[in-house]
Amino acid sequence: MTQTTKLKTLLGTIAVLAAAAWAAPQAHAQTQLRAQTGAPGSSPFIFMTTFQTIAQKYLPVQLNVTSGAAATRSTLDAARKQVELFISSPAVNHYMANGTEMYAQMKEAPELFKSIRSIIDFPLGPYHIVTYEDSGIKTLKDLKGKKVFAGPPGGAATVVALAIIEGATGFKPNVDYQQARLDWNSGQQAFQDKQVDVMVIPTELPSPVIAQYSLLDKIRLISIPDEALNTEPMKKILAVPGRTIDEIKPGVYGKNQTNTEPVKVVGSWVGLSTYKDMDADVVYKLTKTLFEHIDELHAAAPFMSFITKDTALLQMNAPLHPGALKYYREVGVKIDPALIPPEAQ
């Protein structure tokens, strides 16, 4: 073998080894995705962590999930491409698109909202208005002078909780009762420690969070009176997309739930969303994988059994991401033209 031939052979071997070295990590490369969800134990948290497990089991992706995030903030973060996946809300979408409520002082909010894209919507669950039986509180009018955790300041859930109280009683926060200004994690802990008298929290039914409280002591769920539904504050929040009227039956939380009659509550929807420039192929594969393994989602919690291809677009009021749109079209889901994004027209 000549020196020239040996050199060519050596160079060829080096090239092959270099290609193999480059290809090996690529074959195992994972798409890193940032995700935000609600507080541990909440419906959004259970959905997102189950989705995380399914996605990472069947796809080369890594979801780095941050919990305790409010949808009002997550939607802004996604619009600014600071997070790829987040728990959205039809109500938050409505406020941001119209520059109202928590976005009233943010002039750029409607323009930022144009970057938000939907993947799936699902029921968050009812707003539980919960107190301990020994508090003596049996109706919303008994909140006079009490300390109430109604959700994080500026959150969409807090807007609903305060409207429910005002609609039923006319009470104003920090005038007729004290509003505890805490995040979800701190607020739930404060209720458990009886540092607040009442907590208002949207969560699935039955909720592991509420069930935990019922193991510690007797609890009472407070009902919205029928006459409150016709008040202006209640009409206003019920007119927002993703809001329903539901009931919680007696005994859902066992013998330590003291209610003997059904409790009337406001129900709410949320969703899994992203931003419009998110890779369409990744979103398509995430959507497809979720539904191909929907049995694993259903097995994780009873409330998620409602999630199917037929319910995925209910209450949705932000355009679908093109990747999700592709999947729904493939499986024959009827799509409202309003949900088709401009880039897919």
Image (cartoon, helix red, strand yellow):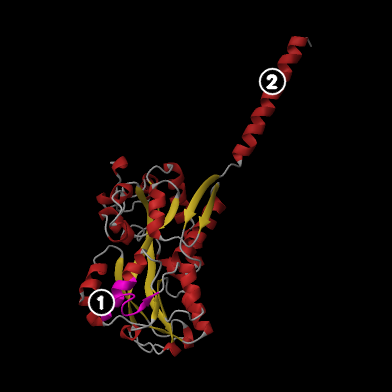
| Viewer-side residue, 5 vs 226 | 226
Q: Is residue 341 visible?
A: yes
Q: Please state, as top left, top right, bottom left or bottom right, where the N terminus lies in the image.
A: top right
In the shown orientation, is residue 294 left or right of residue 163?
Answer: right
Q: Residue furthest front?
A: 175
| Viewer-side residue, 307 vs 71 | 71
Which residue is label 1 attached to?
167
In the shown orientation, is residue 94 left or right of residue 202?
Answer: left
Percent position (x, y) of residue 223?
33, 82
- SS under mark 2: helix
Give me the disc on residue 132. none
Q: Which residues are magenta?
A: 161-179
- C-alpha separation, residue under disc 2 versus residue under disc 1: 78 Å
Q: Residue at x 27, y 55 (%)?
A: 99
Percent position (x, y) of residue 214?
49, 82
Q: Residue at x 32, y 72 (%)?
A: 162
In the shown orientation, is residue 219 left or right of residue 105?
Answer: right
The amino acid type of the residue labelled 1 equals Gly
Q: Residue at x 34, y 72 (%)?
A: 161
> Is 164 colored magenta in this rendering?
yes
> Is 132 colored magenta in this rendering?
no
Which residue is label 2 attached to?
12
- SS under mark 1: helix
Percent position (x, y) of residue 268?
34, 67
User: Marks 2 and 1: CB-CB under 8 Å?
Assistant: no
